[in-house]
Image (cartoon, rainbow, N blue to C red):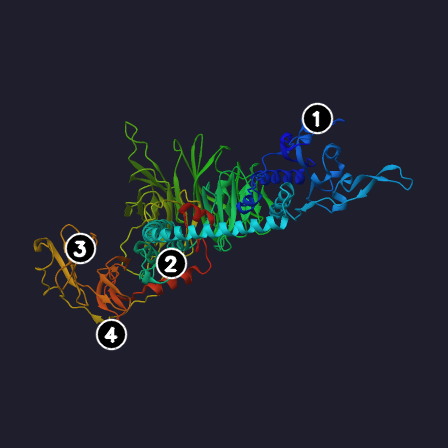
Amino acid sequence: MSLDKVRYDAFISYRHCELDSFISENLHKKLESYKMPASVVRRIGAGKTKIERVFRDEAELPLSDNLSDPISEALDNSEFLIVICTPRLKESLWCRKEIETFVRTHDRKHVLLVLAEGEPEESFPDILMYEEVAARDENGNDITVKVDREPLAADCRGENNRQRLKALDNVVLKLCAAIFNLNYDDLKQRHRERRIRNRLIAMSAALAIVSVFAVMCLLFSVRISRQNKVISDKYAGAMATASAKLLSQGQRNDAIYAVRNVLPDDARGGYNKDAYYALVRAIAPYETQNCYFPTKSFKIPQDARGFSVSEDGEYALINCEGYFIVMDMAEDKQVARVESMYSDIALFSDTGVVYTDDDLQAIYLDPVTGDTSVLAQEGFDLYYVPAEKTVLVFSADAITGYAGLKERFKIDNPMDDPDYEVDDVFISGDGKYAAFSMSGYEGMECAVIDIPAGRLVKSVHLDDVFSATVCCDGEKLYVCCDDEGDMTGVVTSSILRTVELASDRETTCDIPGYGFYNMLAGDNGMLLVSDSLAYVLDGNGSISSTITGYMDAVCVIERDEGFVIIDALGRFFSDSVFSDVDRCYSLYGHDDDAMISAAVSSGDKLFIEYRDSGRMTVYSPDKTGYTAMADTGDAIPFDENPDADIDISDLEGIDEISVFGRALSADGKYIAVNSNDGTMYIFESSGGRKVKEIYDTGIVLMSGLFPYLKNAGVYIIENRVFDEDFNMISRLPDGALVATGRDGAGVVIESPYSLDTYYEISIMPYDEMIRKADGILKDYVPGSDVRDKYSIGQAGE
């Protein structure tokens, strides 16, 4: 067989299964891409130096007795047969036929084996383990005998495909040595030399490129470093905004975490001043007044429609659309969930939860064990009287009081209409009286129940009235409803009816305004509330004082000094003037953008649900540790008129006519000047160079005070705290600066709410503030919902 007739350098025979196909496919590619080392090419001269074509059948052969013509032709026109040997090879009829066909027309030395799996005795085809040779028997006759032979084989076995692929590189060298009739060891050595030489060339080229690249990198690294600093600074600024937003909703730990995450431990490398300002605001180390401080925030369902709090303050009942849940607030976990289309009237009793199920049954639930009991077969509406530990259950024909699971009293319903609705309920603080209004088709029934006695005290029917708010002080029933309006139907006033409980005497009076929906009675009189107007009434229904300016009252608190209304913007409104610094009338960190949808006062705590936030926050009245000083003691008073001798004529670009306040810093380095447009300028006292321009209409240099606290490295102008570059990093409480603190590390402020009351406030250096933040957070990490919403990265990310 001449070489001119050979169309393929090799024919690959293999079993069509996963491993065999993987080996044959990769071997095919490596053989056809193999390049002979140049040193070997020069030595063999014009001989064959490249494998041109390798045949590999990619399709499974059909079941028949004969090989297809293309396969037979390829076998005839292939110089070598490469057999992929695995234990599965012997099972293939067609692999055996391919081998038999090839050895009929070719020398067996042209059959090359590749051991891909198993041992040789189980993987090599039997036909290649012997060779038939001509011989003579003892009688001199010509015979054919089988002689054992060891075929040439290359090993590519491995525990995985990665190892097998690596072994194939050596297999290719062995096969090429046989195909090109070369010595394998020589070919392997030449191949190794070429690989080393190529690496050296590549390394030389790489070094040259690296030299150029290093210079470019040096240039780009400066630019990238600057860009990264800008990006980091912008991100830190975004976290400052996020922190303020989180704090406004009472998420104090989340607010601290957001900015602590972008502030370095050490200030010497620089830090974002907005982030630091937000951190100080969230920590609140300088707050001298009592506020409601956020102490805990936790997730609630987004479809929450209201909530109540258990008497012990440990559980919250969240009313949702079609269900309610009970949460253990200390553990921040849900302990019960109940489906009910009347979920909005579920409430706490003294021992558990009472709700109305879909069948209008009143059900008692123990939130700890999950056990339920039927309290009443019918319950349209439910109310709880804490002082008497009694649940009032309204049904079609009765009002029933339950203490625990036991019926305490049952009163005939004064409303004849079985389809009535309870419009308003008032329960006295001592639990003795419950007043309620019920509306039906024929008007309204307003009544009073004596709860300890379990009896109906008074019932009044109102025709043509379908909504009223009620109250009771133990002597009188008060009923307020809108007036009928003028001739055009416009309502501008309300009618207050006063009914004496001991007689039938009734009086009425007009109340300016309309839409009053809540009435409370307490030691300070009665409070009549609408969306934007409230009156404090005396026992005769006369107006004592007015509360206005609020938007949508969400909570009312009675204090010794009067009533306080909290509105949807988180603002506090009262009917009296307060100067006592020990009273709480603000939510710390809150701003008007954080709308409140519901609020409950329980004990000294406030529980607040923020609109569209899916969160509830617990606020507690808390001090930051500063105590009022009787006098300034050993503090160093400031000069009474420090700006009298400050010459500003040489200051850069300043018009003396526009100046209305000036101050010289305590260290003598800087002069601060106020202009009429609300801008404050900072100048070097020596030479008059302007170093900073600050637009802040809140800074008015009326006192002329400009302290410098060396220990903290800060300047103080009015109640603003600046670093040494005059970036504002925190604020102090409102009040007049009067002195430097005893140790020179703080200032003394006179309270604006109480004359002759002073606070000495120590200003924390940066590293101390960072340690305080870390002490608050400890191992705290915000939930994924908060991190995702505000793009807050975890430490180290």
- Mark 3 surroundings: few (<14), some (14-19) or many (≥20) residues within 10 A: many
- For this rendering, which residue is in front, 140 or 415? 140
Q: Counting residues from the N terminus, which is met first, the one under dot 4 or under dot 3?
A: 4
Q: Which residue is mark 3?
A: 680
Q: Nearer the viewer, residue 201 or 580?
A: 201
Q: CA distance from mark 4 to mark 3?
A: 32 Å
What amino acid type is highlighted by mark number 2?
A: Pro
Q: Secondary structure at mark 4?
A: loop
Q: Residue at x 14, y 66 (%)?
A: 642
Instruction: Identify the image quadrant of the N terminus.
Output: top right
Q: CA distance from mark 1 to mark 2?
A: 94 Å
Residue 634's disc is: 4
- Look at mark 2 in the image and give the residue it sits on: 621
Helix, strand or loop at mark 3 = strand
Q: Position of residue 675 (x, y in %)?
A: 14, 53
Instruction: Tell me residue 68's x, y (percent).
Output: 70, 26
Contact, CB < 8 Å: mark 4 with mark 3?
A: no
Residue 501 to residue 444: above or below: below
